[in-house]
Amino acid sequence: MKKGEPDTIVNDSVGNSSQEPMINIENLNVAFGPLQVLKGLSLKLYKEENLVVLGKSGSGKSVLIKCIVQLLKPDSGTIEVLGSNVGSLNRKELGELRKKIGFLFQSGALYDSMTVRENLEFPLVRIRRKMSKKEVDDKIKEALENVGLADALNKMPSELSGGMRKRISLARTLVVDPLIMLYDEPTTGLDPVTSDEISELINLVQKKYKTSSIIITHDIECARNTANRILMLHDGEVHTEGTIENFEKSNDSLIKSFFK
Amino acid sequence: MKKIIPIAKVRGYATNKTIRLSDKTIEKSQLASIFFLDVGNMALFIARIFRETFSRNFEFKEFLRQCYEIGNKSLPLIAVTGAIMGVVLTIQSRPALASFGAVTMLPGMVAVSIVREIGPVITALICAGKVGSGMGAELGSMKVSEQIDAMEVSATSPFKFLVVTRVLAATLMLPILVIFADGFGIFGSWIGVNIKGDVNLVLFTSQAFGSIDFMDFIPALVKSYFFGAVIGIVGCYKGYNAGKGTESVGKAANSAVVLASLMVIIVDLIAVQITDMLA
């Protein structure tokens, strides 16, 4: 290993490399003015796997998933989602692709002027315009039952706790049956018990909806509970990639500081 | 401190000439570029409003909700302000007219003033404060709390849902509020007249409306549509383009009020010139 090069755990059994990736990112560069946030980052997300992206605050984790849904435009590099190069899509094509991606925001991002029901209805009635009222009601009920909050239907977001807001936000993404889920710090600001519940929910979503997920976090317990594969970012670059066992056995000082 | 800026290329030819610019000049040129960038962005914003208004799947339910929010909830404030303006204008004008022995012209004069100028401008300025700041703050906080991003990634159009509906509702509701303000203003004037006299309401209104003709009412109504559009566009633009953090919500609301009020006055100036030319 060259001096200054990061310790990298390469494990061929990680991910199913024989499959066509759901997301394929190559040489992604993002800078905000003089600050280079992502430096030539590459990653693949395979079908029905949970990929946890670990890293310190400011390491570019959230920027990465915002680039995937084109909330941020990268300076260079390619992002292929379900075989489409997102950078070359027009507005309509991007809209079609976004229907297949669920995004759980760190804050939940519930529409605070709407009830829980209206929050869930909002994407559903606009994406599936031909659905009958009964089908919409059934879909909302099913999504709320899956996150264990069937009785919160008529509540306002301000009446919900932090954990409940995350669950409702997750239900809002699930009503449109996404193929890919992007979780931005799903357990941040939650107590350990609620964090574990959210992690279990992420696993449940993976099994029930057959989703492929990128989970951005710096919560090791969440990573332990949900990861099929872990990718650690440091200074905008992939520092390490491997399974949870690889990371726990690693002698790298940065990894140790997370897993102590 | 002077900075040396090399002129790298002039019409394609490389040159080693240099110019000297002070920090103040650089700062001013940066402010000018920010201003022109803002003007350009607002032009694109307005073009997008037109494009999305005539595209498919108009958010009619949200448009009606915004009409209710802007119209119904602003009405009490407009009514009280209009009535007070009527009273004040009457009390202030009475001595001047009395000195010419023209007190009988008071209802007509006040009615023309209210319908042509005071009603539309005062209503627009109140709405710039109430509605414009509300839009700036609401959209700004939605931007800060990632709600607009959440709409965007769920393959829906936040612009159509949040901006187009608000701008159209403000454009449609402001002339209606102006009519109410005019009505309450004339009623206030009747109260003002009766403080020092005894005039029948029917006689007062017949004198007031007898002095107003078609060309007093229509230009005022037309400019009210523009006032509404300006308030909606500025409020939404400032909110939709708010920066990060709670401070930007306050800034968005504040700058929405300031710019919308200024734009109302500028639109009024242009409208008066056009009306004068047509008359």
Image (cartoon, coloured by chain):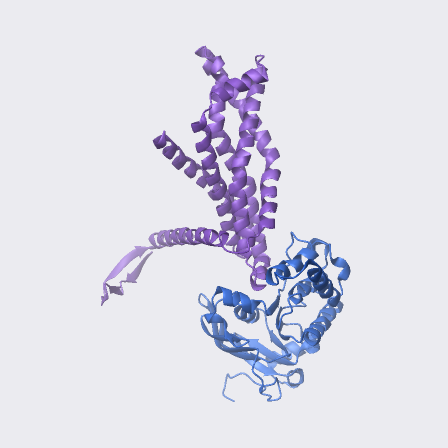
Q: Position of residue B265 (x, y in %)?
A: 44, 37
Q: State the residue in front, B49 or A51.
A: B49
| In-image side of A56 versus B216 (left or right) | right
Q: Furthest-top residue in view?
A: B101
Residue drawn at (52%, 46%), measured in percent from left and top?
B168
**Above or below, B191 relative to A81:** above
Q: Is residue A251 above or below residue A140?
A: below
- Asked whether, in this view, residue B24 is left or right of residue A113, the answer is left
The quadrant in which the C terminus of chain A is found is bottom right
Coordinates of residue A49 in the picture (x, y in percent): 64, 79
Q: x, y (%) of residue B18?
A: 25, 61
For the question of whether residue A21 can be seen, the reply is: yes
Q: Position of residue A221 (x, y in %)?
A: 70, 74
Which residue is at 66% across, 58% downward? A121
Which residue is more in the foreground, A241 or B271? B271
Residue A252 occupies quadrant: bottom right
Is any atom of residue B132 visible in this view?
A: no
Counting every numbered tag in the picture gives 0
Which color has been applied to chain A in this rendered view?
A: blue
Above or below for B211 versus A195: above
Left/right of residue B277 with respect to residue B263 in the rendered view: left
Q: Quadrant of residue A64?
A: bottom right
Q: Which image quarter: residue A151?
A: bottom right
Q: Which residue is at 61% across, 43% downward?
A: B69
In the image, the chain rendered in purple is: B
- Give me the residue at 65% from left, 51% from top: A113
